[in-house]
Structures are given as structure tokens and as C-alpha cells.
Image (tube, rainbow, N blue to C red):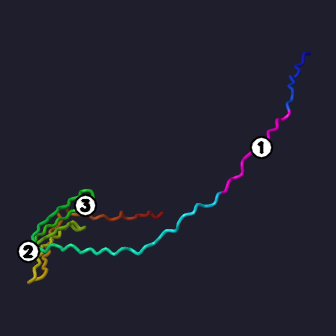
């Protein structure tokens, strides 16, 4: 019978390496820095610019919002001639009705507003939870 003989290899002893030489850290004296000098703030006199005065002011503005994404629908318009202001604004309430406010303001009568309500353009659907039905055996 033929028998295989294992092959032997020579064994090498572990190699020794000396640790790397590292220089010790060098410490230096901190740099000399002058302390900050604080001075009193300098007072600067500024004369306020006089605001122009208009004894008879006039303006007109208006805007409309119709946001289909959020359902926000509103508008406003206003005009002023001297000390008399006329204006109106409207908005759609959560129930779908439209509120319109017309107002005037002047030094003699003060502020006066008249409120109108228009019915909803489309009926607002009423949502209710489905009834709970339980079968009794």
C-alpha cells in the first residue's frame, strides 16, 4: 500500500522590530496679546427728517382673492379724499354665505358700517357619520 507523506516546511522564528522613535511634544509660552481697549461710545446727533404732511390726502386701493385650493374668497376696496374714507370688503363665510361690509368714515359722523349677507351660491353639503348598526344574535 502506498501512503502519502505530508510535506514539511521549515519554521521561521518571529521577527522583532523596535518601536518607532517619537519626539516629545514641544510646549511654547503663550503669545503676549494686548488687552482690548474699551472706549465710551461717541454720541452722534441725528436730526429726524421731517415727515411730509399732506393736508388733503388722496388714495385708492383694491384687491381680490379667489384661491380655489384653500377656498379663500375675499375682496376689499377703499378710497380716501381728504378726511373722508369710503370702502367695502367681502368674504365667503364657512357656511357658504357671502358677507359684504360697506363703510364710511369722516370727522363729522365717525365710522359707520352696513353689513349685507347674500345666500350661498351652492348649498354646502352636510356631512354626518354613518349610523352604527350592531346585529344581536
Q: Secondary structure at mark 1?
A: loop
Q: Residue shown at 9%/70% (left/top)?
A: 58
Q: Name the N-terminal-most of marks 1 and 2.
A: 1
Please name whichever residue, 89 or 44, is drawn nearer the observer in this view of the structure.
44
Crowding at mark 3 (Cα within 10 Å: few <14, some 14-19, many 20+):
few
Task: State which mark lies toward you, 2 or 3.
Answer: 2
- Element at badge 3? loop
- Which residue is nearer to you in this view: 17 or 45? 45
Q: Quadrant of residue 65?
A: bottom left
Rendered location of residue 69, percent (x, y): 27, 56
Mark 1 sits on what residue?
A: 19
| Label 1 packing within 10 angstroms: few (<14), some (14-19), many (20+) | few
Rendered image: mark on residue 71:
3
Q: Residue at x 24, y 57 (%)?
A: 68
Residue 126 figure quarter: bottom left
Q: Is residue 123 left or right of residue 112?
A: right
Q: CA distance from mark 2 to mark 3?
A: 39 Å
Q: Which residues are magenta?
A: 13-27
User: On residue 56, which mark appears?
Assistant: 2
Amino acid at each position: 500500500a502506498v501512503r502519502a507523506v505530508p510535506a514539511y516546511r521549515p519554521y521561521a522564528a518571529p521577527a522583532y522590530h523596535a518601536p518607532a522613535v517619537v519626539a516629545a511634544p514641544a510646549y511654547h509660552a503663550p503669545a503676549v496679546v494686548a488687552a482690548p481697549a474699551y472706549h465710551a461710545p461717541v454720541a452722534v446727533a441725528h436730526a429726524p427728517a421731517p415727515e411730509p404732511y399732506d393736508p388733503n390726502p388722496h388714495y385708492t386701493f383694491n384687491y381680490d382673492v379667489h384661491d380655489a385650493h384653500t377656498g379663500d374668497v375675499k375682496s376689499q376696496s377703499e378710497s380716501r379724499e381728504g378726511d373722508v374714507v369710503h370702502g367695502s370688503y367681502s368674504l365667503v363665510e364657512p357656511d357658504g354665505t357671502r358677507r359684504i361690509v360697506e363703510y364710511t368714515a369722516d370727522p363729522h359722523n365717525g365710522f359707520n358700517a352696513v353689513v349685507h349677507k347674500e345666500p350661498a351660491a351652492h348649498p354646502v353639503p352636510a356631512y354626518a357619520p354613518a349610523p352604527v348598526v350592531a346585529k344581536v344574535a
